Amino acid sequence: MASVLVKDLIEAGVHYGHRASRWNPKMRPYIYARRNLIHVIDVRETVRGLLRARKFLQQVAAGGSLILFVGTKRQAADTIQHESERCGMPYVSDRWLGGTLTNFRTIRSRLGRLEELEQLRASEELAKYSKKMQSSLNREYRRMFRNLNGIRTMNRLPECIVAIDPKKEKNAINEARKLGITTVALIDTDSDPDMVDLPIPGNDDSIRSIELIVRYLADACLAGRATGGNLKQEQAEGDSDADDGDEGTAPVVA
């Protein structure tokens, strides 16, 4: 499996880092060589990071906890939305709102306003407002939908955050660290690996690279959910069998 994964990573260009002049010296352990002033990332380190992240995400998903995917840069937004929806996890793909984690209760309350606007747009009430007010309400709805739609299902704080480019998502990473939430990130040669708990060294600008990594991590979430569902079913069947056994036992008369 590892050889197949390495082949996919190389074909997707995951090993291409930034210009050597922009590197972060803390990324030295993850760099294989320098070619034409460009750092080449050690794909073996990428595989190790992916395998560690997959194992952890499977455990989190199997336990029924939430994993928040974050990627607001243009190259990552569509992939983050698609893969998060596929694995049933919340996401932020447009803009990170300050306090999404540290002021979670307030952010959740804003979802009530979004639902209120949706109900208004779906009814005939909106037509009763002036053209100017309708335009204002529609703008408010579009803005809130972009910012909040991905976290509708996040009814509690996540146990883990998966981020693309921790430099770009530094606010999300900082909030997660304050709350002790584990961070997993695709991290290029210009970033600080100490900022995240589980770094995955790789190109965080290429669409193909981002798609491959995020798809792999989303698959891990799906596998974890399937494992957790099977365990719950087995426990339910075990409890049912135990109940049946109790009912079939005749009382002992002394």
Image (cartoon, rainbow, N blue to C red):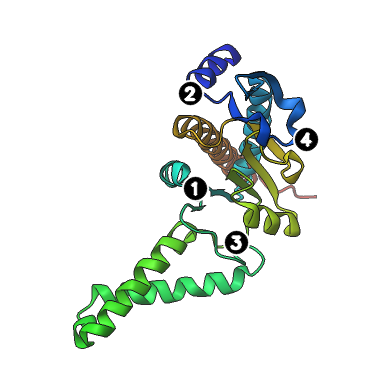
* Residue annotated with mark 3: 156
Q: Which of the two discs, 2 and 4, sits closer to the camera?
A: 4
- Judged left or right of residue 159, residue 7 is left
Determine the CA span between mark 1 and mark 4: 23 Å
Residue type at numbered disc 2: Ala
Residue 76 horizontal/vertical position (percent): 47, 43
Determine the CA span between mark 1 and mark 2: 18 Å
Question: Residue at the spot x=64%, y=57% of the render?
Answer: 171
Of pointers 2 and 4, the one earlier in the residue sequence: 2
* Residue annotated with mark 2: 12
Task: Give the number of marks.
Answer: 4
Q: Which of the two discs, 1 and 3, sits closer to the camera?
A: 1
Q: What element carries label 2?
A: loop
Q: Are marks 1 and 2 in contact (CB under 8 Å)?
A: no
* Residue annotated with mark 4: 26
Determine the CA span between mark 3 and mark 2: 35 Å
Of pointers 3 and 2, the one earlier in the residue sequence: 2
* Residue annotated with mark 1: 73
Camera-nearest residue between 56 and 178: 178
Question: Residue at the spot x=49%, y=47% of the render?
Answer: 73
Of pointers 1 and 2, the one earlier in the residue sequence: 2
Determine the CA span between mark 2 and mark 4: 24 Å
